[in-house]
Image: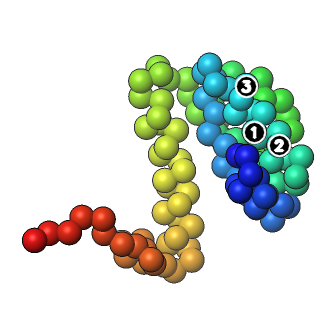
Amino acid sequence: MKHGPIALVDETLPVIVIAPSDPLFEKTVSNMNEVMARGGRVLLVTDANGAQRAGVRRWKSLVLPKVYPEPAPVRYAFPVQLLAYLATATKGTDVDQPRNFAKSVTVE
């Protein structure tokens, strides 16, 4: 969140914070607080323990069930991927042919 990304934050920018209650939770909440201090709206994706520990200062929360650490990245990525898909579809953009997409593999 330092330098470039934090400079983009203002009251019109929703920021999705993915913060399961794990050993890095406090650092993630610290970044979330920096966003809110600059007027950014925070959507916190966490578990019940994380929602309680983060406090009430946030725009919205999505509380997921507690999971084991190994499958947690998949569980937490799913809502963000769904949100990206729905935003793209709502905007009318072709989700299968994103703009400025370049293939990184060339075939001979």
Alpha carbon distance from label 2 to label 3: 13 Å
Q: Give the amino acid at mark 2.
A: Glu
Q: Which residue is depicted at the point 45% across and 78% down? A: 99
Circle 1 — which element?
helix
Residue 72, compared with residue 39, is above or below; it is: above
The mark nearer the N terminus, 2 or 3, is: 3
| Tag shown at residue 34 | 2
Residue at the image position 78 percent from the left and 29 percent from the top: 54
Identify the disc placed on residue 26: 3
For the residue pair 35 and 70, the one nearer the viewer reads as 35
Instruction: Decide: few, some or many residues near mark 3? Use Cα within 10 Å; few <14, some 14-19, many ≥20.
Output: some
Residue type, mark 1 in image: Asn
Q: Which mark is residue 31?
A: 1
Q: CA distance from mark 3 to mark 1?
A: 9 Å
User: Is any part of residue 57 visible from this angle?
Assistant: yes
**Relative to the observer, which residue lies in front, 80 or 107?**
107
Whether tag 2 and tag 1 are in contact, CB under 8 A, the answer is yes
Q: Is residue 76 left or right of residue 52?
A: left
Marking on residue 69: none
Where 25 falls versus 62 (above or below)? Answer: above
N-terminal label among 3 and 1: 3
